[in-house]
């Protein structure tokens, strides 16, 4: 396990390395460190802006080699956001190191967690948030597949689909309450009264009666949140969504 001192030391070394790399014209802290919210579990989040003539592929290859040879990385994975690539490294100490490599025009704040260390940042359009109506659509889509999975005796698929309904309901709740919606980051900020009914959607076993119970609960909370988003749409969807769970009622 790494210590906060280990993390700070490595982050300082990476920023110094970036300053010495002529292909990198800007660097920023991102994540919790950028807003003074680090704790002992926080990882390293950095963003680098590349010079206009820099070869992103070559820079990425050189930094990846250094992370393995000099800092002991044991694996990495990539995520893309437009032209920016986020390379995420895992160290033996369990420390996660996220480094974004952005072209000059894409180097800048897309949210509040961006603290410029050197160079210049370009103004970026704000990060878009999902449309609640789209989340509702995904919610009922997962619900359809939850029903058929239970009916077919596919217990693990049913659990997956029920969880999908719940995840989209929780995202809707986050949007409604104005807390971070991505990757569950704002769930702890939701009022307990809001999340309490969602606890009933947790699947406690793969027995068919339990899957049916959790499925009914997931549709219940989806309908509740649907009414908060669009009352007219709720009227149109409620009867059909209730029909989804009618066959799961104990008296069926």
Image (tube, rainbow, N blue to C red):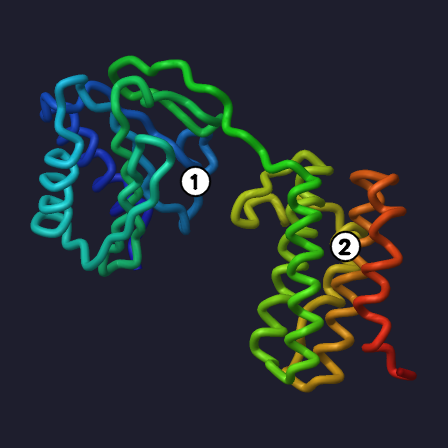
Mark 1, residue position: 38
User: Which residue is pictured at 27% across the width and 38% down the height?
Assistant: 99
Q: Nearer the viewer, residue 46 or 249?
A: 249
SS for tag 2?
helix
Q: Residues within 10 Å of mark 2 (few under 14, many from 20)?
A: many
* Residue contact at pointers 1 and 2, CB within 8 angstroms: no
* Residue 204: percent from left, percent from top: 67, 78
The label shown at residue 222 is 2
Instruction: Choose mark 1 or mark 2, whichever is in front.
Output: 2
Q: Is residue 23 left or right of residue 123?
A: left
User: Which residue is pictured at 86% across the width and 48% down the height?
Assistant: 236
Q: Is residue 158 left or right of residue 79?
A: right
Q: Nearer the viewer, residue 60 or 153?
A: 153
Q: Residue furthest right?
A: 251
Image quarter (top left, top right, bottom left or bottom right) of the N terminus: bottom left
User: Which is more N-terminal, label 2 or label 1?
Assistant: 1
> Where 37 falls versus 205 (above or below)?
above
User: Which residue is pictured at 73% across the width and 64% down the height?
Assistant: 199
Q: Nearer the viewer, residue 159 or 235?
A: 235
């Amino acid at each position: 396990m790494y210590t906060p001192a280990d993390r700070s030391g490595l982050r300082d070394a990476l920023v110094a390395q970036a300053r010495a790399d002529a292909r990198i014209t800007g660097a920023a802290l991102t994540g919790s460190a950028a807003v003074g919210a680090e704790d002992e579990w926080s990882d390293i989040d950095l963003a680098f802006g590349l010079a206009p003539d820099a070869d992103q592929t070559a820079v990425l290859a050189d930094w990846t080699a250094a992370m393995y040879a000099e800092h002991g990385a044991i694996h990495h994975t990539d995520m893309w956001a437009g032209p920016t690539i986020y390379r995420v490294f895992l160290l033996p100490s369990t420390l996660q190191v996220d480094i974004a490599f952005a072209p000059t025009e894409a180097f800048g704040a897309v949210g509040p967690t961006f603290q410029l260390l050197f160079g210049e940042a370009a103004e970026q359009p704000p990060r878009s948030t999902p449309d609640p109506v789209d989340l509702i659509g995904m919610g009922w889509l997962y619900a359809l597949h939850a029903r058929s999975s239970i009916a077919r005796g596919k217990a693990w698929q049913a659990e997956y689909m029920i969880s999908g309904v719940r995840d989209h309901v929780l995202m809707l709740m986050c949007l409604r309450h104005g807390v971070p919606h991505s990757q569950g980051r704002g769930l702890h900020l939701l009022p307990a009264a809001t999340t309490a009914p969602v606890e009933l959607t947790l699947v406690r076993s793969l027995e068919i009666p339990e899957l049916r119970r959790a499925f009914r609960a997931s549709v219940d909370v989806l309908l509740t949140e649907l009414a908060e988003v669009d009352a007219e749409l709720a009227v149109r969807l409620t009867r059909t969504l209730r029909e989804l769970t009618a066959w799961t009622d104990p008296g069926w």
